[in-house]
Amino acid sequence: MSNNLLAGKVGIISGALNSQSIAWKVAQKAHEQGARIVLTNAPLAMRMGEIKALAAEIDAPIIPADATSVEELNTLFTEAQSHFGGKIDFLLHSIGMSANIRKGKSYGDLDYKFFQQTLDVSALSLHKMLAVAEKQDAFNEWGSVVALSYIAAQRAFLDYTDMAQAKAVLESIARSYGQRLGHLKKVRVNTISQSPTKTTAGTGISGFNAFYEYAEKMAPLGSMGSISVPFWNSSIMKG
Ligand SMILES: NC(=O)c1ccc[n+]([C@@H]2O[C@H](COP(=O)([O-])OP(=O)(O)OC[C@H]3O[C@@H](n4cnc5c(N)ncnc54)[C@H](O)[C@@H]3O)[C@@H](O)[C@H]2O)c1
């Protein structure tokens, strides 16, 4: 049901890979609530093609950008503002990748090149996005930025390997940049600690089913395995 909660708001949503992606559902719901959206993802994800179906459904352009490339992020924010004819109100950072997880490396046997890539893709990309946005003065006052975290940022979950460190860095960047952008533009920067959700990134983690079942039992309303969206919209609105 639409209450037009995001009528007149415009923003960038990263990370919609397929219809299981958290970003995919957020984009559908934000569109339903009246927002205008620019979708972005890594060029490789573009080639996989599914995002084009979402773009057609919600009438959003796709601007490809590798979130580790400041140059490509500069293009993303410039083109998004040109598409909207002004500054943006919200940004969803929904990006994560660990080659150590993909290759089944245990915590004691991490590949350090992969580890650096995990930090770059999954955490520093938030800083890069915000630094580019700040330099372009791309946010409207009272804008809102949301990034996806996981409880392993704060507790030991060994199967989450280097992503645990990436999420700790992501949360720290959100605090520091939240303070900076709050002072500069009254822009809120928050992370949401998402419960285990059956997406491409989520199900790649060994032991994922145990995480999922545990959350299902512990959470008062069960796991958010199929993402509940009113909360998301209120996060975008209120920070
Ligand atoms: N699924 C879960 O259980 C869960 C739990 C907590 C947090 N999260 C976080 O939620 C976010 C979204 O993940 P998801 O579960 O929807 O999985 P997903 O695989 O659908 O989304 C991950 C996205 O990151 C994108 N990406 C990877 N490298 C990139 C790069 N260099 N530049 C730009 N984009 C890049 C991928 O293309 C993909 O769209 C991630 O930050 C993830 O860590 C997921």
Image (cartoon, rainbow, N blue to C red):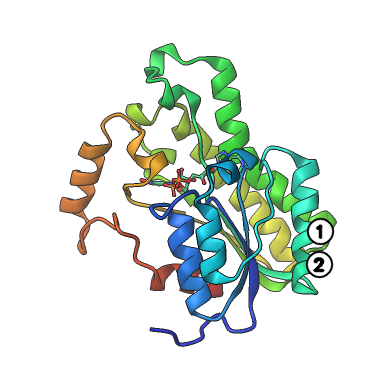
Residue nearest the observer in this picture, 158 or 22? 22
Give the alpha-carbon distance from disc 1 to disc 2, as whole Å.
Answer: 6 Å
Q: Which residue is mark 2?
A: 82
The numbered mark at residue 58 is none
Q: Is residue 231 left or right of residue 47?
A: left
Q: Please tell me which residue is depicted at 50% across the width and 80% down the height of the picture.
A: 33
Image coords of residue 81 (percent x, y)? 78, 66
Up-down relation of residue 19 to residue 126 (above or below): below
Residue contact at pointers 1 and 2, CB within 8 angstroms: yes
Image coords of residue 218 (percent x, y)? 19, 52
Residue nearest the observer in this picture, 191 or 25? 25
Q: Please tell me which residue is depicted at 45% across the width and 51% down the height of the picture.
A: 18
Up-down relation of residue 210 to residue 139 (above or below): above
Image coords of residue 171 (percent x, y)? 54, 46
Residue type at mark 1 is Thr
Q: Is residue 110 left or right of residue 82?
A: left
Residue nearest the observer in this picture, 24 or 139? 24
Residue type at mark 2 is Ser
